[in-house]
Image (cartoon, helix red, strand yellow):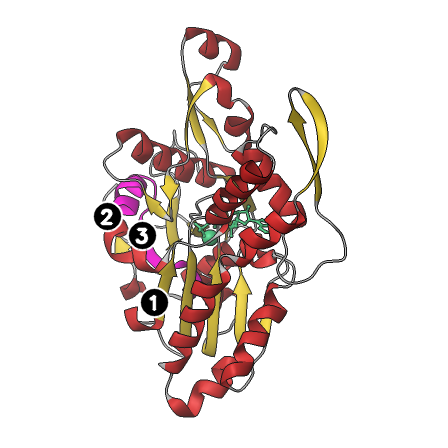
Amino acid sequence: MSDKREVLHVGIDLGTSRSSISASNGQRHVIESYVGWPLDMVARKVLKKPVLIGRDALENRTMLDLHRPLEQGLIKEGSEKDEAAVRELLWHLLSLVGVKREERGGTRVHAVVGVPAEALRVNKQHVRKALSGAVESLMIVSEPFAVAYGMEALVHSMIIDLGAGTTDFCVMNGRLPTEEDQRTLPQAGDWIDDQLLRHVNTRHPQASVSIHMVRAWKEEGSFVGQTKTPVLVTAPVNGKPTELDITNEMRQACEGILPPIVESMLDLLSKVQPDYQERVRNNVVVSGGTGLIRGLGPRLEQELQAVGGGKVRVVKDPVFVGSDGGLAIALDAPEDDWERLSS
Ligand SMILES: Nc1ncnc2c1ncn2[C@@H]1O[C@H](COP(=O)(O)OP(=O)(O)OP(=O)(O)O)[C@@H](O)[C@H]1O
Ligand SMILES: [Mg+2]
């Protein structure tokens, strides 16, 4: 007898810093990819919850064993806590769109999950494990492919998804991308944060600065190339809030990702069939939070001049493109493309 219960299709973008879900019931949510467990009995009494997720976890981090389980876009291996954290994240995302954990098997969920391109081989097993019991059918796709699908940039295009943990490239030829069409680099948002922290510490050794502070400064003032407005921030120096000019440090940290990104972009382009290269060059899509760096799109176009010129489109509101793309794939995919998970 066929199962008459309704199917809920979802697209999930499992990101290093943010994870989002788009569901066929119209719900869309994004959370920060943090999970934390109260450190001791005091923390448990204060927080009144066995586990905290997202912003809630980040804001209460002093009381928590805090995990950001996806590093460089991979589920950290060998750590039971990180595996548990991924499970918590995924269940939390599902609960946000109305799938109840208590009602195991209550809703039939068909999920498309996007992971970084090169993580596909190694990471599939982890994602499967984390989702078993939660979803009936699963499809794991590369993040940039999900973005391409969501943007309907499926033919003669190149997607560059600049996230927190990785920058992922994918050339679309109007069919499913193969391994040769895709590439992953470790230079992305987290890398910029590390560089910026280093540069600021070197320039202003007396200031106390944390990685969370530099990340917020970057999200406000990131740029490559020229800027008319200096980047001014406030940080404590010997306990006294002091204004610092970090314009040069910001430029240096943001421009640091350019050489490997330009190299991969040009290299992947050179591998496209010669008759289609010009069309792909004119159809470059930049997505992801790090794609919002001011001046990045024009700078990549400038670099494309060396090979005949091209056009770069930057996705202005990148938060849900990956999960929306995943949902679109879920709604279109034929029966045979899904893998069944035992619940
Ligand atoms: N305006 C901005 N300028 C520069 N960086 C930004 C800006 N806004 C957000 N970011 C950065 O974008 C990154 C988050 O982007 P995104 O949500 O696409 O990543 P993710 O999906 O979590 O990571 P990944 O795809 O690598 O797993 C963070 O590093 C964040 O600091
Ligand atoms: Mg991402």
Query: What's under tag 1, amino acid-wise?
Result: Pro
Q: Give the alpha-carbon distance from disc 2 to disc 3, as whole Å.
A: 14 Å
Vertical order, 70 against 308 (above or below): above
Residue 291: give its label.
none
Give amino acid for label 2: Gln
Relative to 3, is 312 on the left or the right?
A: right
Residue 307 at x, y percent in the picture: 49, 84
SS category of the residue bearing label 3: strand
Q: Earlier in the sequence, mark 1 or mark 2?
A: 2
Look at mark 2 in the image and give the residue it sits on: 125
- Callout 2: helix, strand or loop? helix
SS for dot 1? loop
- Magenta span contains residue 137: yes
Residue located beneath label 1 in the image = 334
Which region shows up in magenta? 125-145
Along the line of sight, which residue is nearer the eye, 3 or 170?
170
Sequence order check: which comes first, mark 1 or mark 3? Answer: 3
> Percent x, y for residue 187?
43, 55
Query: Is residue 279 something that shows in the picture?
Result: yes
Identify the residue under disc 3: 137
Residue 190, x across and y down, in percent? 47, 46
Q: Quadrant of residue 102?
A: top left
